[in-house]
Image (cartoon, rainbow, N blue to C red):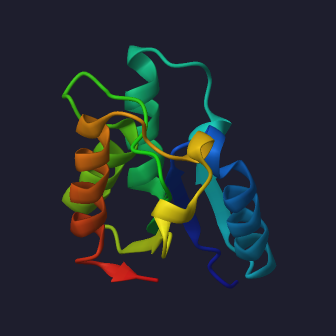
């Protein structure tokens, strides 16, 4: 029996719905099992425990970074970045897809506050240290 790899897909949500769907379709065509936050119930304290469990059970962690940093969690960083740090701490192979020209994205798909623009840039630089496209 061939192993089917589970891939946790992480990104901000509203601005990258189409991109996430494309990645999920590509993974399904490769006989992989995509998983990600849109498969989970509404946010609460138990959701983070569930997300960590799914990351632990996944073979790979994939992050898609566009022009948004995302919702800030209790640690002062975005949930997407929290997932990234957790996957790295678990030793998961990380694959990052970064938008080549985030400054060219429409305004509704980019950060508006200087604080989050800086956090997004720092997160992009961190993700660039792993396998990136």
Report whether residue 55 is seen.
yes
Is 47 on the left or on the right of 3, as rendered?
left
Image quarter for residue 128?
A: bottom left
Q: Is residue 73 above or below residue 119?
A: above
Residue at image point 41% right, 30% down: 71
Frontmost residue, 75 versus 65: 65
Is 128 on the left or on the right of 56, as rendered?
left
Residue 83 at what x, y percent from top left? 35, 47
Residue 43 at what x, y percent from top left? 51, 19
Image quarter for residue 15?
A: top right
Residue 120 at what x, y percent from top left? 31, 51
Q: Is residue 93 above or below residue 70?
A: below
Residue at image point 46% right, 25% down: 47
Report whether residue 90 is seen.
no
Is 69 on the left or on the right of 125, as rendered?
right
Frontmost residue, 12 versus 55: 12
Residue at image point 38% right, 30% down: 49
Furthest residue to the top?
44
Frontmost residue, 60 versus 108: 108
Residue 31 at what x, y percent from top left? 74, 77
Total labels drawn: 0
Frontmost residue, 73 versus 39: 73
Residue at image point 61% right, 53% down: 35
Task: State which quarter of the image contains the N terminus.
Answer: bottom right
Q: Is residue 42 above or below residue 102?
A: above
């Amino acid at each position: 029996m061939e192993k089917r790899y589970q891939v946790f897909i992480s990104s901000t949500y509203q601005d990258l719905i189409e991109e996430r769907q494309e990645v999920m379709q590509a993974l399904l065509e490769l006989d992989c099992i995509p998983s990600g936050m849109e498969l989970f119930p509404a946010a609460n304290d138990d959701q983070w425990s569930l997300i960590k469990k799914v990351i632990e059970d996944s073979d790979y962690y994939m992050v898609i970074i566009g022009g948004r940093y995302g919702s800030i969690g209790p640690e002062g960083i975005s949930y997407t970045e929290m997932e990234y740090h957790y996957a790295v701490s678990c030793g998961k192979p990380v694959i990052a897809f970064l938008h080549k020209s985030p400054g060219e994205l429409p305004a509704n798909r980019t950060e508006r506050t200087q604080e989050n623009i800086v956090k997004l840039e720092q997160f992009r630089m961190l993700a660039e240290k792993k396998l990136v496209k």
